[in-house]
Image: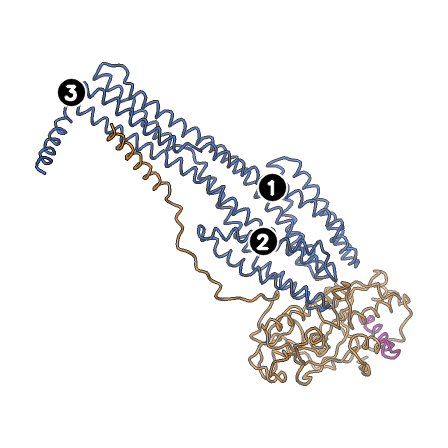
């Protein structure tokens, strides 16, 4: 009796053991995964490209020209709202607002004030003067933020009436757009971390130098005799981000933009001489010659009546003599 | 030793002799029945156990994992939208937006650690999880850097925020989507495992009962007795076991198919919610980009289209007031968004921002839509967990019962045949 009981229990135990074995199958974890994390790909701004060849390889050398020479004003500036019928200005007046392409990332020139959310800066104030001349009201203006390489397409597609965005006048661009007379004279320099031993563009051979896509600065960097590695980004502030994160060794562009960076980061310094001349002009669609002449008349007035000097003083410090206008008629 | 060997020889001759005699056949029959009963009992128990394991895996692992993955995805998309909104509001961000962002970060981290607990079981998750846990701190670091610069009035803050948004779109959200995909596949697999029709149980049980009936017919012919109590009891035990296993399994199959519906609804609402949050992020970033947000606006439109399809699909699958309300709020949001675009394109940037932030029309419609979706999602999830719990309840006790009934059947058939065997002594 006891024996049979024991045998029964053993059998039951065996059955249960078999069950447990079978039921337990299939859920055994595989080999433990490795920990990883041995390599880091740093976060980067959108659309960063390291150039292997100068960006202007496709550019057919533009015929030589006097890049700073614009169209002569057809007379004194008309009063606000009093523009010739059928002109570009009349069309803008009918539209009710002036559409201007600007930047929101270049401190002191065209930037978004983080406190108010408003666009401000030297370029923005210049654009407002154009609106004031047209409408008598500097606020009749719609800003469209453009990156460097969007400036010419936006004008060609007439998405904006004009572009006031640290835009260098050169013969290549004259092929596609029209420029006003020079409203600011800048020059390209180099910004490096304050610990850097670089003394200018000549000592940056083989090192990474940042500039925006479609800017003349990028072409100048890529063509520099010392052969730096040009890194192209979308917006100027992306360059400062990459410099602060140690992803580039230097930023090279116009002194105005660099001054804005230096103001945001005390651990940077502007080094070397100006190695290019960058005359800024407002850019217009190629056909709008009447509007160019109108704005040139406005610029004559701004230079003469001290408005230019006061806007310069507001953003860029003690004003020098305004750049002289040159005309090609 | 010698005695043992003699006994062995004796036993062998007895067995060979017995096999040819009726008592021998009866003994063989008894052995076969014991073996068959125990084997069928074991196989049935294993099969039921697997079903129950699938339900346990569903309740304890894959469903919580899928929920955690959904939560990772959702909170990251929401953090992105909140960060962009805080930036857009200008100056120091509103405490509500900051709080929402902080909550998103906390929930994303908590959900990530829940999901990380599953790595050893599902190595398929390892890649996306290590990407997520490696880059999420980088993301929050970038957002904080952006915030610091913002507070100092440096425009470079906007660039840091864009870099953060880029990291979110390029690395974090795709990984979160991958994680969510893998996790929801786990739920479907477990539901399918639990919802297989119990053919094996049925065939095995039926075969065993047939064998027992045949054995009784054989006995009846040999011994002229109509019933053998032992074998009848064994047959009854097997029948009970069969019915128990098959009926319980069939009920589970029914629950599993209900669960698949709940799961599908949970998935649709989760996807709709994520699409809502992503579209909200794009709407905000369109304004942050200030006239240069064509690609964000395009993504908003694409997202809104997907969202419209998801909501319509949800309403068709399960007509319920919550989806009707979600659809209404979605349409309100679309109308408000059209107003936002009109204001922005007409140059009234401040009005556009006003519509998108705080108690603006677009903000209110978005919040209402999200509220609907949260409600729908929580309900689907509760229904799914409920269904699984009920299915598990049905199966509870089935395995021990099947084992016990198999033992009872084995003992009873042995006893029944033993009675007959005794008559040949």
Mark 3 vs mark 1: in front? 3
> Please, is residue B29 above or below residue A89 in the view?
above
Using the rendered view, name the quadrant where residue B168 is placed: bottom right
Q: Which residue is mark 1?
A: B378
Q: What chain is colored orange?
A: A
Q: Disc 2 sits on a residue from what chain?
A: B
User: Are the residues under marks 3 and 2 on the same chain?
Assistant: yes
Which residue is disc 3 drawn over? B425
Q: Which mark is residue B108?
A: 2
Q: Residue at x 20, y 17 (%)?
A: B222
**In the rendered image, is residue A326 in sight?**
no
Mark 1, chain letter?
B
Tally the numbered discs.
3
- Per the rendering, the colour in which chain B appears is blue
Instruction: Classify A8 as above or below A238.
Output: above
B348 vs B17, left or right, is: right
Neighbourhood count class around disc 1 (C-alpha, 10 Å): few under 14, some 14–19, many 20 upward: some
Query: What subunit carries mark 3?
Result: B
Where in the figure is residue A215, as x and y percent of width and height? Answer: 67, 74
Which stretch appears magenta? A286-307
Between A45 and B404, the one lying in front of the other is: B404
**Viewer-closest of B370 and B301:** B370
């Amino acid at each position: 009796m006891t024996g049979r009981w024991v045998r029964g229990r053993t059998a039951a135990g065996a059955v249960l053991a078999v069950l447990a074995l079978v039921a337990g199958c299939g859920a055994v974890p595989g080999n433990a995964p490795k920990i990883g994390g041995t390599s880091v790909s740093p976060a980067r701004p959108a659309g960063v490209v390291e150039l292997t060849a100068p960006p202007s390889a496709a550019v057919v050398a533009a015929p030589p020209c006097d890049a700073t020479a614009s169209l002569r004003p057809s007379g004194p500036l008309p009063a606000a709202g009093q523009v010739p019928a059928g002109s570009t200005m009349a069309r803008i007046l009918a539209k009710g607002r002036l559409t201007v392409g600007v930047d929101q990332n270049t401190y002191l020139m065209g930037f978004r004030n983080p406190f108010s959310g408003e666009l401000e800066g030297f370029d923005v104030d210049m654009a407002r003067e154009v609106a004031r001349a047209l409408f008598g009201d500097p606020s009749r203006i719609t800003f469209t933020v453009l990156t460097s390489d969007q400036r010419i397409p936006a004008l060609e597609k007439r998405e904006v009436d004009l572009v006031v965005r640290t835009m260098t006048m050169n013969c290549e661009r004259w092929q596609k757009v029209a420029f006003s007379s020079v409203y600011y004279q800048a020059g390209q320099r180099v910004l490096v971390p304050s610990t850097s031993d670089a003394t200018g563009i000549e000592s940056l051979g083989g090192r990474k130098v940042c500039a925006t896509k479609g800017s003349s600065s990028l072409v100048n960097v890529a063509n520099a005799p010392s052969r730096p590695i040009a890194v192209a980004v979308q917006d100027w502030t992306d360059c400062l981000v990459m410099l602060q994160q140690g992803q580039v060794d230097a930023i090279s562009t116009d002194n105005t933009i660099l001054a804005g960076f230096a103001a945001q980061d005390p651990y940077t310094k502007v080094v070397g001489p100006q190695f290019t001349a960058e005359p800024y002009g407002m850019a217009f669609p190629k056909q709008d010659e009447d509007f160019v002449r109108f704005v040139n008349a406005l610029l004559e007035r701004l230079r003469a009546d001290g408005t230019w000097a006061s806007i310069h003083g507001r953003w860029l410090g003690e004003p020098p003599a305004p750049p002289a206008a040159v005309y090609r008629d | 030793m010698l005695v043992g060997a003699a006994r062995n020889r004796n036993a062998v001759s007895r067995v060979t002799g017995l096999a040819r005699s009726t008592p021998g056949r009866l003994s063989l029959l008894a052995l076969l029945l014991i073996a068959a009963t125990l084997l069928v009992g074991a196989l049935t128990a294993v099969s039921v156990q697997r079903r129950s394991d699938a339900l346990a895996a569903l309740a304890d692992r894959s469903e919580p994992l899928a929920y955690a993955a959904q939560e990772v995805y959702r909170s990251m998309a929401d953090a992105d939208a909140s960060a962009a909104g805080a930036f857009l509001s200008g100056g120091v961000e509103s405490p509500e937006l900051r709080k929402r962002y902080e909550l998103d970060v906390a929930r994303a981290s908590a959900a990530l650690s829940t999901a990380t607990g599953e790595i050893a079981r599902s190595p398929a998750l390892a890649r996306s999880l290590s990407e997520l846990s490696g880059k999420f701190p980088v993301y929050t670091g970038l957002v904080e850097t952006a915030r610091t610069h913002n507070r100092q009035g440096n425009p470079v803050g906007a660039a840091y925020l864009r870099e953060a948004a880029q990291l979110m779109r390029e690395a974090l959200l795709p990984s979160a989507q991958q994680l969510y995909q893998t996790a929801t596949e786990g739920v479907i697999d477990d539901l399918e495992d639990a919802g297989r029709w119990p053919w094996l149980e049925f065939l095995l049980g039926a075969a065993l009962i047939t064998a027992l009936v045949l054995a009784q017919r054989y006995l009846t012919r040999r011994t002229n007795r109509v019933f053998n109590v032992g074998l009848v009891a064994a047959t009854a035990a097997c029948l009970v076991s069969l019915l128990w296993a098959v009926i319980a399994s069939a009920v589970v199959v029914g629950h599993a198919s209900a669960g698949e519906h709940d799961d599908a609804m949970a998935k649709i609402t989760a996807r709709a919610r994520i699409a809502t949050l992503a579209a909200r992020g794009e709407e905000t970033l369109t304004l942050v980009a200030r006239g240069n947000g064509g690609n964000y606006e395009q993504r908003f439109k694409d997202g809104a289209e997907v969202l419209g399809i998801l909501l319509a699909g949800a309403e068709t699958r399960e007509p319920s007031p919550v989806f009707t309300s979600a659809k209404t709020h979605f349409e309100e949001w679309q109308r408000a968004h059209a107003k936002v675009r009109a204001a922005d394109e007409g140059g009234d940037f401040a009005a556009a921002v006003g519509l998108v932030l705080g108690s603006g029309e677009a903000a209110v419609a978005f919040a209402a839509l999200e509220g609907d979706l949260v409600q729908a999602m929580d309900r689907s999830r509760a229904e799914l967990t409920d269904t699984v719990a009920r299915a598990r309840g049905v199966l509870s006790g089935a395995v021990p019962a099947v084992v016990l009934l198999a033992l009872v059947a084995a003992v009873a058939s042995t006893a029944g045949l033993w009675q007959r065997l005794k008559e040949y002594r």
